[in-house]
Image: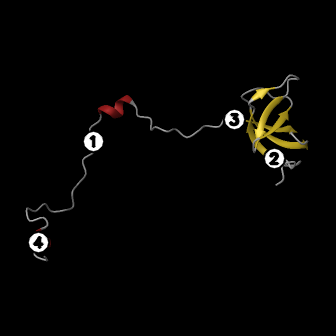
Amino acid sequence: MNENEAPIKAGEVHEVKILSVGEKGDGITKVNGFVVFVPDTKKGDFVKIKITKVMTKFGFAEVLEKLEKKELPQKFMEVKAEELTEEEPQFESHHEETEDFGADLEDEG
């Protein structure tokens, strides 16, 4: 890709978050690092867009669908207070405990 070629093309569909709002009230997002103006959106909107026009430094898109806010995966597991006080489950042991553990290994040397 040369420096004058945009990383997007008219007709492409993308799911994006509107990052800010421009002077004329259009939402602004980035697709592959390329600025795209999206009318009828506001900062924080999650939308499915279709690229309608691509210029040298920026592009334009129309909203195809308003999306629900994407839930990002949690880094930590949620634990309820009741779960903290529960006893740990006891697992049945299917192995016989012996005092000569590893004795057979000593004989090999």
* Residue with the mark numbered 2: 13
Looking at numbered disc 3 in the image, what kind of residue is underneath it?
Glu
Q: Position of residue 32 (x, y in %)?
A: 75, 45
Tell me the CA gap for discs 4 and 2: 67 Å
Q: Residue furthest bottom?
A: 108
Looking at numbered disc 1 in the image, what kind of residue is underneath it?
Glu
* Residue with the mark numbered 3: 68
Is disc 2 surrounded by few (<14), some (14 to 19) or many (20+) residues within 10 Å? some
Looking at numbered disc 2 in the image, what kind of residue is underneath it?
Val
Q: Which of 89 and 108 lies nearest the eye of the viewer?
A: 108
Which image quarter: residue 69?
top right
Q: Are marks 2 and 1 in contact (CB under 8 Å)?
A: no
Q: Are marks 3 and 2 in contact (CB under 8 Å)?
A: no
Q: How is the image coloured?
A: secondary structure
Tell me, for residue 106, which label it has, or none. Answer: 4
Which image quarter: residue 48?
top right
Looking at numbered disc 4 in the image, what kind of residue is underneath it?
Glu
Compare marks 2 and 1 and give the one earlier in the sequence: 2
Compare marks 4 and 2 and give the one earlier in the sequence: 2
Q: Position of residue 12 (x, y in %)?
A: 84, 49
Q: Are marks 4 and 2 in contact (CB under 8 Å)?
A: no
Q: Residue furthest left?
A: 99
Tell me, for residue 1, which label it has, or none. Answer: none
Compare marks 3 and 2 and give the one earlier in the sequence: 2
Compare marks 4 and 3 and give the one earlier in the sequence: 3
Disc 1, SS: loop
Compare marks 1 and 4 and give the one earlier in the sequence: 1
Compare marks 1 and 3 and give the one earlier in the sequence: 3
Look at the picture and state if 97 lies above or below 36.
Answer: below
